[in-house]
């Protein structure tokens, strides 16, 4: 449950004592507390109510000028029941005092170590807590985007991990980046000192901080791939992620407007335009400039779609909506991850929740949303038809099919479904949310010299899926052997 700044100010001043939310299920409970930027807020009661039961007095207690303003905001969210949340007193954030507790007794040191170990044990990507603390200690004030690359994680997951450390009082946020709190620095210094006297503990911590082996390796169509080589191919450098690739026509009414390594596609229609993938928030104006260079108006974007809920693909959604007023649509299974994606504190907009197989239409162009989970729960592969040269072509905007470091039974089942379903999709023009997935640079270089459109490449429609399926199955084999 999140509050915009004006509501936080009202809560702090005691003017706001009530809140209303539309939820599929409540995210707070009666008798509990909620940590906010203003402090720890007590939750007195949480009750389902009919919208018609909300009075003008209720709306004023919730910080709205009138009931109509509150009801309009609640109705903007299409799904869920309406809940009335009675707010109690606001107390100081206990984490602030916790961060200053540097005189750690042996029991306190061990308690922190135990809680960090539990976080590591529950992680699907292996131990991360000590590695993250070391990174923050060595790089105070470094942007989260740069820290997550050093950690080998996507930005959203990295920020969620840092938030868990913050709950333990070990880190604190700066205007840019993070630093260790006095408590975090004290625990880490003592942990290092204990390594000298405790060789077993030292070996465990060293195993946590060591970079995992770059395995398995798979060979597909004569090319060998490893997990790191695929990640490096997809992401490139920071400069690659933010520098515009020459905007160009792909086929029919489909255009590329992304960066060197992060795809963004513009689909033009007579009724306005569709954008697939906003990428990072810092890239939105770069994408807008590419749209304008092609002779179109960025303000004419009416629909914003995405492939999956990772920051490098959909972090910029709120800014695109702010600049264009576009309707943001997302696959149902990715909604929780998207709602947690809040660059600079802005709520992530979702105007329509999609289900597998639903169509999205604008100006005579129809796209179909196909649920292809695995990389994320709601990973979405989009398909459409494009006309060029008197012919009609099947265009596929592929989601990422890369498996995480640890494949759980749920993820295994998701990928098994995804890889089977993909081959049933008609495809003439394969595209992807990273340009390297469909060899964009080489095809672009052939545009001027080739008499035919190099992006029409039916023979390689599922080349990327072959690579990722081979890696997925190799990872499973390696996991099963390690478990014996």
Image: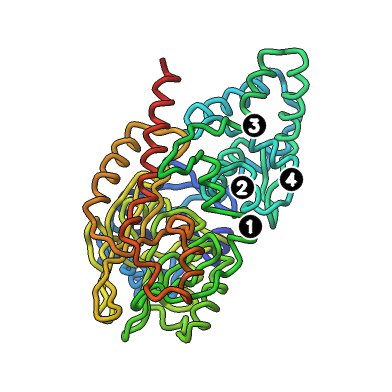
Position in image of residue 139 (x %, y %)? 74, 45
Mark found first going from the N terminus, 4 or 3: 3
Give the labeled residue for mark 2.
149
Q: CA distance from mark 4 to mark 3?
A: 14 Å
Give the labeled residue for mark 1.
238
Using residue 64 as the reference point, say whether residue 289 is left or right of it: right
Using residue 195 as the reference point, say whether residue 48 is left or right of it: left
- Label 3: how many Cα within 10 Å (few below 14, some 14–19, many 20+): many
The residue that appears at 57% across and 73% down in the rendered structure is: 286
Corner quadrant of residue 49: bottom left
Using residue 96 as the reference point, say whether residue 378 is left or right of it: left
Give the labeled residue for mark 3.
130
The numbered mark at residue 139 is 4
Where 128 falls versus 53 (above or below)? above
> Are discs 3 and 1 less than 8 Å apart at CB?
no
Give the total number of marks visible in the rendering: 4
> Are discs 2 and 1 less than 8 Å apart at CB?
yes
């Amino acid at each position: 449950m999140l509050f915009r700044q004006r509501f936080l100010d009202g809560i702090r001043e005691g003017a706001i004592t009530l809140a209303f939310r539309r939820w599929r299920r409540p995210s707070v409970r009666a008798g509990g507390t909620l940590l906010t930027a203003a402090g720890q807020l007590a939750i007195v009661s949480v009750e389902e109510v009919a919208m018609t039961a909300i009075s003008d007095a209720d709306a004023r207690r919730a910080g709205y000028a009138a009931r109509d303003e509150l009801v309009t905001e609640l109705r903007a969210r299409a799904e869920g029941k309406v809940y009335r949340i009675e707010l109690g007193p606001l107390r100081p954030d206990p984490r602030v005092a916790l961060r200053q507790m540097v005189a750690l007794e042996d029991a306190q040191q061990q308690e922190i170590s135990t809680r960090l170990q539990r976080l590591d044990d529950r992680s699907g990507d292996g131990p991360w807590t000590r590695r993250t603390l070391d990174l923050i200690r060595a790089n105070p004030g470094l942007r989260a985007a740069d820290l997550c690359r050093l950690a080998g994680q996507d930005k959203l997951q990295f920020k969620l991990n840092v938030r868990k450390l913050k709950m333990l009082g070990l880190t604190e946020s700066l205007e840019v980046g993070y630093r260790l709190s006095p408590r975090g620095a004290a625990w880490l210094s003592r942990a290092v000192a204990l390594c000298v006297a405790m060789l077993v503990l030292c070996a465990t911590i060293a195993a946590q901080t060591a970079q995992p082996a770059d395995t398995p390796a798979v060979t597909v169509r004569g090319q060998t791939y490893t997990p790191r080589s695929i990640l490096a191919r997809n992401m490139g450098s920071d400069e690659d992620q933010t520098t515009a690739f020459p905007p160009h026509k792909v086929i029919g009414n489909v255009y590329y407007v992304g960066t060197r390594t992060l795809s963004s596609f513009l689909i033009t229609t007579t009724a306005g335009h569709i954008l697939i993938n906003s990428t990072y928030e810092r890239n939105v104006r770069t994408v807008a400039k590419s749209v304008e260079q092609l002779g179109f108006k960025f303000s004419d974007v009416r629909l914003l779609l995405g492939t999956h809920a990772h920051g490098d693909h959909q972090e910029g959604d709120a800014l695109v909506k702010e600049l264009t007023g576009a309707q943001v649509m997302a696959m149902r299974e990715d909604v929780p991850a998207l709602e947690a994606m809040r660059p600079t504190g802005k709520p992530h907009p979702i105007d329509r929740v999609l289900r597998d197989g639903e169509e999205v239409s604008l100006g005579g162009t129809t796209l179909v949303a196909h649920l292809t989970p695995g990389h994320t729960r709601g990973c979405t592969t989009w398909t459409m038809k494009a006309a060029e040269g008197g012919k009609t072509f099947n265009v596929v905007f592929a989601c990422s099919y890369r498996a995480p470091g640890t494949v759980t039974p749920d993820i295994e089942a998701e990928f098994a479904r995804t890889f089977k379903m993909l081959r049933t999709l008609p495809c003439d023009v394969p595209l992807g949310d990273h340009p390297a997935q469909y060899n964009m640079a080489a095809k672009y270089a052939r545009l001027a010299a080739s008499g035919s459109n190099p992006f029409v490449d039916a023979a390689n429609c599922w080349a990327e899926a072959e690579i990722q399926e081979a890696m997925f199955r190799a990872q499973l084999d390696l996991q099963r052997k390690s478990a014996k």
